[in-house]
Image: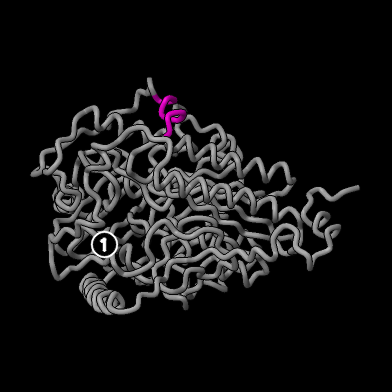
Amino acid sequence: MSKPNILIFMVDQLTGTLFEDGPADWLHAPNLKKLAAKSTRFSNAYTASPLCAPARASFMTGLLPSRTGVYDNAAELSAALPTYAHHLRRAGYQTCLSGKMHFVGPDQLHGFEERLTTDIYPADFGWTPDYRKPGERIDWWYHNMGSVTGAGVAEITNQMEYDDEVAWNSVRKVYDLARGHDPRPWCLTVSFTHPHDPYVARKKYWDLYEDCDHLMPEVGEMDYASHDSHSRRILDANERSAFDISETDIQRSRRAYFANVSYLDDKIGDILEALETTRQDATILVLSDHGDMLGERGLWFKMSFFENSSRVPLMISSPDMTPGRVDDPVSLIDVCPTLVELAGRDVSEISPWCQGESLVHLGNGGRRGTPVMMEYAAEASQAPLVGLRHGPWKYIRCDLDPELLFNLEDDPHELNNLAENPDFADTLDDMRTMADSRWDLSKFDAEVRASQSQRWIVYEALRQGKYRPWDHQPYQDASERFMRNHMDLNVVEENARFPRGE
């Protein structure tokens, strides 16, 4: 059986609540809608952790943060942990990354043979939280509400420059793959940083949403005291009380966010066009690392297990999976074993190093009986939080906080906590039992604290004296590009052409 080429589109902070069955009808996203029509669409896909680095490490390994050790945005992914890039490379694939994956530490490849761009975020330990200092806010890298009050239009930003580069390199790579110099099947991962805040968009995309009916959240801002304990910590970490947020600020932020979905749609369309014009077939995945609260409940960004933050888009277009909607809850940790199965390998080979479950059978009418697990032990927390999504139920626990239990079928906005309702005591006991069988929260907390304190020592030490950054440096050998005098011009021109000359 021939192994399919694989093209993975990963975006950043795109909420799955906009992708219940492909992109929402009102989004201007023609390329994603066209792809959705031939994809298995997972309406209830969840991140493993609602923060960039932990979510991405889990996506790549099929392991939760408590197993990867990537608890936050400054935790190292061990070079000894197998990723889907390692598994596919062992299966005979060439593997390439264009864009962000937020690897921390000296290994900036983690199984990828080639990485076309540097990352947008730092690779060192400087963003490490510190549970020894509860409530401390690290001003120079924590989010604040300036992303909301500063929302609007710009033609170039730090993030646009990055994603423009990611897309350009990806298109060039698709053309290069078509030349066929390497006979192996390929896996190309294209990872953008939009629609992650700041909420700033180019005017051509901003203008698409001038008359949008979705510029205000469905659940408005709540009094501080009405929030659950973790949400209050998020509000404090984001300095919510230091900013006056107007209705106009909210509308402009959401408008820019939607506009950046359309910006991404254009970028993805450029890459798909290159794939089509070079007549290459590929299994295609679209997903995000986590979502964005987008002002729901007065919360912004991520760091929360509420739906806007924890639910992500997930679509898979594969000849081995039937197009259509799947409502069973699934996780980003399921992507790694799914890729292994789609590549024709036995998933049992990776089961010792993977907590996820392949989704291929769900794309063929199968069902899932196990719960989806989530963890969070990063900024705005003071002890690890864990969550379960099982059937209609979502359960959230932290040793510092009262339990939360929601029925998402009856209460999609998670406004009615059933944990203290005696009518749901049996359900609460069932969810507790499932959580107890999966987590020892005291042990989890101790491991997070040890990791944080060790990293602070290492970071402070490495900032003394000569500093050697871990950031990925994309390398190009100019002596091997285009035409040089050690090359035969006729061979160069023929090898660089697709299709070949008659």
* Residue plotted at (80% across, 65% down): 487
Residue 203 lies in the magenta-colored region: yes
- Residue that extends furthest to the left in the rendered view of this protein: 225
422, 389: nearer the viewer:
389
Q: Position of residue 378 (x, y in %)?
A: 26, 62
* Residue plotted at (24% across, 32% down): 249
Q: Position of residue 123 (x, y in %)?
A: 38, 66
* Residue plotted at (38% across, 59% down): 121
Which quadrant is home to the N terminus? bottom right
Residue annotated with mark 1: 378
* Residue plotted at (41% across, 53% down): 289
278, 374: nearer the viewer:
278
Colour logic? one colour
- Start and end of the magenta stretch? 202-209
Q: Is residue 389 left or right of residue 328?
A: left
Q: Position of residue 50 (x, y in %)?
A: 33, 54
Q: Quadrant of residue 269?
A: top right
Q: Is residue 191 left or right of residue 481?
A: left
For mark 1, give the secondary structure.
Answer: loop
Q: Amino acid at mark 1?
A: Ala
97, 497: nearer the viewer:
497
What's the magenta bit mostly, secondary-structure-wise?
Answer: helix
Q: Position of residue 90 (x, y in %)?
A: 63, 72
Q: Crowdedness of circle 1 by 10 Å Cα count: few (<14), some, many (20+)?
A: many
Q: Is residue 111 above or below residue 333?
A: below
